[in-house]
Amino acid sequence: MSIDNVKQFQQRVIQDFALQDQLKEATDAEQFAQLAVKLGKETGYAFTVEQVKAVSAARQPARKLSQKQIETVAPLIVPYLPLPVTS
């Protein structure tokens, strides 16, 4: 079982519309990961739900923070930012 198997299965899914249709039946991330493990096993790929989640998390684009989130987090970060060096 490995992350490489998840990535190989992803490539197979890209080319296989039947697998795509089956995966679209998942209603949430947990069900998607479980279904991916099941379909992966049926097509010769061994990996775990945790490995599916790890690959999915790595592929998620960075999200932008809302203004409210920035205002909440900024006071916690600002004291740790380096001060500019003046000469």
Image: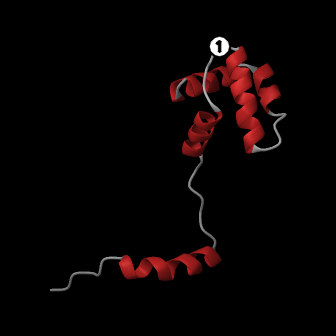
Q: Going by the image, does 77 lie left or right of 52? A: left
Q: Going by the image, does 28 lie left or right of 75? A: right
Q: Amino acid at mark 1?
A: Gly
| Outermost bottom residue | 87
- In percent of width and height, residue 75 lies at 49, 83
Instruction: Give the image quarter of residue 57.
Output: top right
- Image quadrant containing the C terminus: bottom left
- At a point 72% along the width and 15% down the height, the residue shown is 42
- In percent of width and height, residue 60 lies at 60, 47
Q: Going by the image, does 5 lie left or right of 42? A: left
Q: Going by the image, does 68 lie left or right of 87? A: right
- In percent of width and height, residue 35 lies at 76, 30
Q: Say which element carries label 1.
A: loop
| Outermost left residue | 87
Q: Is residue 54 above or below residue 72?
A: above
- At a point 69% along the width and 24% down the height, the residue shown is 13
Q: Which residue is mark 1?
A: 44
Q: Is residue 33 above or below residue 63?
A: above
